[in-house]
Amino acid sequence: MKLSNKQKQFLKGQAHSLKPVVLLGANGLTEGVLVEIEIALNIHELIKVKVPTDERETKALIFDAIVRETGATKLQTIGHTIVLYRQSEEKKIQLPRG
């Protein structure tokens, strides 16, 4: 899904007050974690995922893998947290026109 800059800004504003719904543990990005992210995206559409690693490259690879595996749109990364959006069939979040 292609989002306009206006839509991305709107979603970032919506995500500002959200807490991370998925936290990666010591095992990193496992199948179970991906399933949790999928479920959270289906329920909420807009989520934050926290990746507690200090290695920049590892963090970037994990973020890329999450986006690739879920088909979600990466809105932004803030420190250890990535903000993801994927529209569900119910279209719970009404996006402004592009």
Image (cartoon, rainbow, N blue to C red):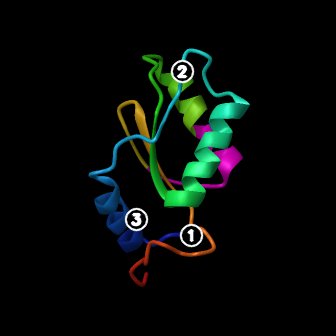
Q: Position of residue 31 (x, y in %)?
A: 72, 32
Amino acid found under the numbered disc labelled 1: Lys
Residue behind mark 2: 25
**Which residue occupies 47% across, 17% down?**
55
Amino acid found under the numbered disc labelled 2: Gly
Q: Position of residue 53 (x, y in %)?
A: 46, 19
Q: Quadrant of the C terminus?
A: bottom left
The vertical placement of 68 against 97, above or below, is above
Residue behind mark 3: 8
Would residue 67 be counted in the magenta stretch?
A: yes
Q: Name the quadrant containing residue 79.
A: top left
**Which residue occupies 28% across, 52% down?**
16
Are there few (<14), some (14-19), or many (20+) residues within 10 Å of tag 1? few
Q: CA distance from mark 3 to mark 1?
A: 10 Å
Q: Is residue 31 left or right of residue 38?
A: right
Q: Under tag 2, what secondary structure?
A: loop
Residue behind mark 1: 2
Q: Under tag 3, what secondary structure?
A: helix
Q: Is residue 58 left or right of residue 9?
A: right
Magenta stretch? 64-75
